[in-house]
Amino acid sequence: MSDLAAWVEAAGRELGLDPADVPVTAVLDLAKDVAHGVVRPGAPVSAYLMGVAVGRGADPADVAGRLSQLALSWSKPTA
């Protein structure tokens, strides 16, 4: 078992979640897209936003896809 899988399993248990329900790949892909396309500190914040949306009933794959698409098309605001 990888370190990541062990962590997700332990953290999931701690929070009363089934580790099989954690969309690890989607979260990691989202974090990568935000970190590289927007700003590095935006990655964990975006993962949190994804979690809030999913907790409110949104589909994890849909949320991750929408946020990744936004990150990949992001143009930095001009001052």
Image: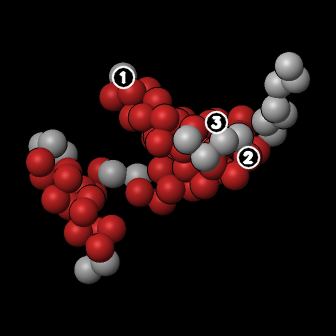
Q: CA distance from mark 1 to mark 3?
A: 16 Å
Few, some or many C-alpha atoms within 10 Å of disc 3 (few <14, some 14-19, many ≥20)?
Answer: some
> What is the number of the mark on residue 30?
none
Q: Residue at 36% of width from left, 22% of height from top?
A: 56
Residue 59 visible in the current orientation: no
- Quick one: which residue is furthest to the top in this view? 79
Say few, some or many: other residues with alpha carbon within 10 Å of mark 2 (under 14 / 14 to 19 / 20 or more).
Answer: some
Q: Secondary structure at mark 1?
A: loop
The relative height of residue 34 versus residue 55 in the rendered view (above or below) is below
- Three-letter amino acid code of the residue under disc 2: Gly
Question: Real-space Cα distance between discs 2 and 1?
Answer: 26 Å
Q: Quadrant of residue 64?
A: top right
Q: Amino acid at mark 1?
A: Arg
The figure's colour scheme reads secondary structure
Mark 3 against mark 2, which lies toward the viewer? Answer: 2
The residue singled out by tag 2 in the image is 37
Label 3 vs 2, first from the N-terminus: 2
To which residue does mark 1 refer?
Answer: 56
Q: Is residue 49 above or below residue 71?
A: above
- Residue closest to the far bottom: 1
Q: Identify residue for label 3.
A: 66
**Mark 3 falls on what kind of element?**
helix
In percent of the image, x 20 and y 61: which residue is there? 9
Query: How far from the left and from the top, in percent, is residue 41?
Result: 55, 41
